[in-house]
Image: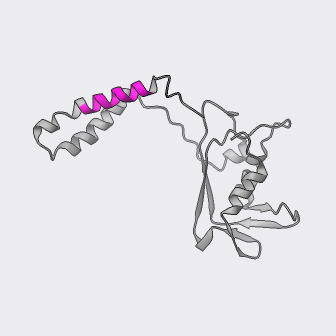
Amino acid sequence: NSYTTSAALQAIIMGSLEKRSGHTYGPPGHKQCIYFIDDLNMPHVDMYDTQAAIMLMTQMISYGQVYDRQHLDEKRDIVDVLFTACMNPKAGSFMINARLQRHFTVLTTYAPTPTLISGIYSKILGKHLQSFSSIIHRLTDQIVGATGDILMSIQNSPSFLPSA
């Protein structure tokens, strides 16, 4: 979120890694670790137009290392770690530093239309209900239609507003 500092991010990441040998750190048991960064665009932009947590993550991904905050002359090599992230389209800075963005494949998705949802679920439910009697199988369109109506009423309800 907007209160995430580089120190907090480093503590979270290093907290789940163990020392392997020398200055090398990685996930326990010589496994791979994938960090999911939710709201990549949320850290606060400071007066220098930077985001310290984002720049630390850029350093980790680009160089595979971070500096020990207590002993600044010691580097910690990070191995077997991958990052994946998402951004909130309605809040945050809307821009990601190009040095960080180059490490990611950027995908954009939009909310599906009711027609698209109906088409997908009709095929799935229709296939599933084939093994039932024809009376049940004929209910496919009604079940999918009712499900779409419920989804639309939830999405349009002031009680269920999209959140960041």
The front one of 97 and 150 is 150
Placement of the C terminus among the 4 image quadrants: top right
Looking at the rendering, which quadrant does residue 47 occupy? top right
The front one of 23 and 69 is 69
Q: Position of residue 77 (x, y in %)?
A: 74, 67
Looking at the rendering, which quadrant does residue 136 occupy? top left
Which residue sits furthest front?
159
Placement of the N terminus among the 4 image quadrants: top right
Q: Position of residue 3 (x, y in %)?
A: 74, 42
Q: Is residue 134 magenta?
A: no
Looking at the rendering, which quadrant does residue 60 occupy? bottom right
Image point (61%, 45%), residue name: 38
Badge count: 0
Image point (69%, 58%), residue name: 13
Q: Which residues are magenta?
A: 143-154
In-image side of 86 versus 113 (left or right): right
Image point (28%, 42%), residue name: 124
Q: From this viewpoint, is residue 117 visible?
A: yes
The front one of 94 and 150 is 150
Q: Is residue 144 magenta?
A: yes
Which residue sits furthest bottom?
21
In-image side of 71 versus 5 (left or right): right
